[in-house]
Image: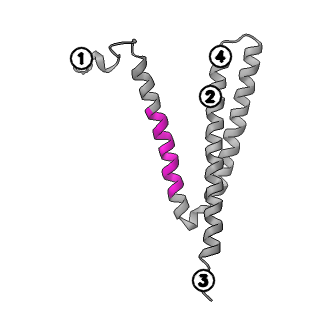
């Protein structure tokens, strides 16, 4: 089976294969955010799930924010003590903060949807 897959599939012709791995990671990241967007759209349309979804999003936002800040502080401590892993912790911490900010925007939009539904979906008197 391994012989059936050409080696060019695993390494690029120029650059030693880094382009393949970089492309793979970008694709995974885009799928990750697409999944977030799909979940968000379903929640925006589902009146029954919106309140519990807002609570879950707020918990996730706090978790990612705290985790991101802890990783950034750890990266600073590692740089001060001459550890080589400081930049890795910094980048992961920043990624966590970006996800927390995405949750923040989703929460605000869902709250606005909830507000508008309550305001304009009132039964006629």
Badge number at residue 92? 2
Spatial distance from mark 1 to mark 4, Cα to Cα?
A: 37 Å
Q: Is residue 62 magenta?
A: no
Mark 1 touches mark 3? (CB < 8 Å): no
Q: Is residue 30 inside the magenta stretch?
A: yes
> Which residue is nearer to you in this view: 3 or 51?
51
- Residue 71: x and y, percent? 70, 28
Q: What is the distance, in whole Å, between disc 1 and disc 3 at their CAs?
A: 68 Å
- How many numbered discs? 4
For mark 3, give the secondary structure. Answer: loop
Q: Are marks 4 and 3 in contact (CB under 8 Å)?
A: no
Distance between the alpha carbons at the discs numbered 4 and 3: 59 Å
Place of residue 101 in the rendered image (x, y in percent of width and height, measured from the top left): 65, 43
Q: Which residues are magenta?
A: 27-41
* The N terminus lies in quadrant: top left
On the rendered image, what quadrant is the C terminus found in? Answer: bottom right
Q: Main secondary structure of the magenta part?
A: helix
**Residue with the mark numbered 3:** 123
SS under mark 2:
helix
Residue drawn at the location 68% of the way across and 51% of the way down: 58
Per the rendering, the mark at residue 3 is 1
Q: Indicate which label's residue lies in the foreground, 1 or 3.
A: 3
Within 10 Å of disc 3 (Cα), the crowding (few <14, some 14-19, many 20+) is few
Q: Earlier in the sequence, mark 2 or mark 1?
A: 1
Secondary element type, mark 1: helix
Comes first in the chain, label 1 or label 3: 1
- State the residue at coordinates (69%, 41%): 63
Q: Residue 116 at what x, y percent from top left?
A: 62, 68
What numbered label is drawn on residue 85? Answer: 4
Q: In the image, what residue occupies the spot 63% across and 47% down? A: 103
Left or right: 80, with 111 as reference point? right
How many residues crowd mark 4 within 10 Å: few (<14), some (14–19), many (20+)?
few
């Amino acid at each position: 089976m391994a012989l059936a897959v050409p080696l060019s599939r695993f390494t690029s012709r120029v650059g030693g294969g880094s382009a393949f791995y970089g492309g793979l990671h970008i694709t995974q990241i885009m799928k990750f955010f697409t999944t977030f967007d799909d979940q968000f759209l379903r929640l925006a349309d589902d009146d029954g799930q919106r309140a519990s979804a807002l609570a879950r999003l707020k918990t996730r936002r706090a978790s990612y924010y705290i985790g991101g800040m802890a990783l950034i502080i750890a990266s600073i401590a590692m740089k001060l003590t001459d550890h080589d892993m400081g930049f890795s912790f910094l980048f992961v911490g920043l990624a966590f903060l970006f996800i927390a900010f995405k949750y923040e925007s989703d929460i605000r939009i869902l709250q606005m949807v909830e507000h508008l539904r309550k305001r304009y979906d009132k039964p006629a008197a």
